[in-house]
Amino acid sequence: MKHLVRELPPVHAFKKSEQFIKLIETTGLTESRVITVIQQIISDLRVKLLTGTSPIENPSKENFFNYIITRTEESVHKRQEDFLTPVINGTGTVLHTNLGRARLSDDAIAHVVAIAGSYSNLEYNIDEGKRGSRHDILEELLIEVTGAEAAMVVNNNAAAVYLILRALAKDKEVIVSRGQLVEIGGSFRISSIMEESGANLVEVGTTNKTHLYDYQNAISENTGMLLKVHTSNFKMIGFTESVQTEALVTLKNQHEGLIFYEDLGSGSIYDFRKDGIGEEPVVKEVIQSGVDLVSFSGDKLLGGPQAGIIVGKKELINRLKKHQLARVLRVDKMTFAGLEKTLRDYLTSEEATRKLPTVRDITKTLSEIENQANAFITALTEVDTGYHCYIKESTSQIGGGTMPDVQLPTYVVSLTHATYSENELAEKLRLGTPAIITRIQEEQVMIDFRTISIEEMPELIQAFIVADR
Ligand SMILES: *Cc1c(COP(=O)(O)O)cnc(C)c1O
């Protein structure tokens, strides 16, 4: 096969071809970028010919040419597709970590777009005409929504935990209940992050029970911190006991210099208990109970962009801001922009808060969900398809390791198809544009309308019609 290598068309042979010219026209790419792709494909083909693994059945100049130009077209189109793409979340899990957690409100999105496209006062004090600090940007707002003395924002809550331990408890003992030594999705373990930070973990109590005296007995002159971790993603039931935040505050106050830090995980600003959902305390209450530092995620119950929010005592926050790591873990202007608008909605009115997509979807009423499910079925039955679908009761989860014991009542549409199995159908929906992510249960594809917005309905229906073909 080696002699065939001589039959390979040279790169310039492609430049005048109809296909090449069309490819440049339709993609807007430069000639040299497309040439680079062609060169790569020729070189791959050469290797294949030399090793006797030709992908072409009847080698000839013409067939080589066609093979190379077809591969080039495929490759160029593939490269032009964005990797990050919107999907429709039909799982009903509101804070789906694999699907990007919270979606932002329209106002937050508009603010991100405006700030991303222009210069901004990210580190500039407009009033005084001189350098400012990005740490100050959201501090006032965070103080207002949480009632804390001071605040700062880092990359995510994992970064917040790390910064706090490293800056305030390095080489000191940090006391944690064994029942709270959690692992949170994607390999974030409290014990590992502690080791990484240089703080010394002191475990107290047992898996199911930790008493106040366990903490009392563990406190020594080397103790720097009491750490309480929200057991976000699991729920212990039965013979269990943990120490109330208030009791730990009292204990901490008996020891000069001891810091009490609570990793809240989700940290909600909106009180979901009012809607009968979960038992999550709002951040303000935790601060009021006297905890020195609290950290939580920006993209969990808060419903903003990925961020780690730290609030608490001014003196401690100042130490964190001055630490070298604060620079390493700092957030971008787009995050600040998204977070700013999200926080403002909490301060504007209850109505504005309820419009935040995360709050809206978690508190979405059964009748709203049922209406959407009905509209979907009606639209689908107007077209001749192989679907068989009906509405049934089910439950949705909040997700993101938040309120794991809460099952929100919902309505789903359950679908089967005349020709496709449930797995085939789910795959067709997933591979369509936009991708639709569903749940499979009892050999049926299920779509939960809690996480589908009214705006997404036409696209969703269209995607189901396309998947039917
Ligand atoms: C989710 C969570 C984290 C990690 O937060 P990210 O914002 O995802 O980095 C840390 N601690 C607890 C208790 C959590 O629930």
Image: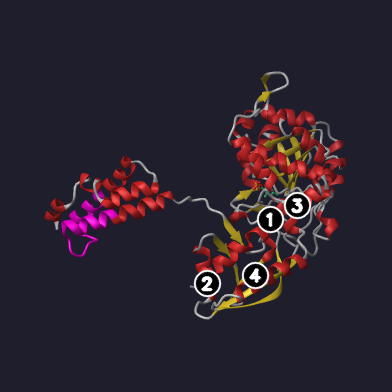
Identify the disc placed on residue 355. Answer: 3
Q: Are marks 2 and 3 in contact (CB under 8 Å)?
A: no
Dot placed on the residue nearer the N-terminal end, 2 or 4 = 4
Dot placed on the residue nearer the N-terminal end, 1 or 2 = 1
Assess disc 4: are there few (<14), some (14-19) or many (≥20) residues with their C-alpha within 10 Å of its C-alpha: some
Question: Which is more foreground, mark 4 or mark 3?
Answer: 4
Element under disc 1: loop
Dot placed on the residue nearer the N-terminal end, 2 or 3 = 3
Is residue 24 depicted above or below 318 in this figure?
Answer: below
Element under disc 3: helix
Q: Which residues are magenta?
A: 42-69
Residue 221 visible: no
For the residues labelled 1 and 2, the Cα–Cα distance comes to 29 Å
Disc 4: which residue? 376
Element under disc 2: helix
Image quarter in which the N terminus is found: bottom left
Element under disc 4: helix
For the residues labelled 2 and 3, the Cα–Cα distance comes to 33 Å
Is residue 424 depicted above or below 114 in this figure?
Answer: below
For the residues labelled 1 and 3, the Cα–Cα distance comes to 22 Å
Tell me which corner region of the image, top left, top right, bottom left or bottom right, holds residue 31. top left
Identify the disc placed on residue 401. Answer: 1
- What is the three-letter code of the residue carrying label 1? Gly
Disc 2 C-beta below 8 A from ligand 1: no
Coloring scheme of the render?
A: secondary structure
Q: Is residue 67 magenta?
A: yes
Question: Which is more foreground, mark 4 or mark 1?
Answer: 4
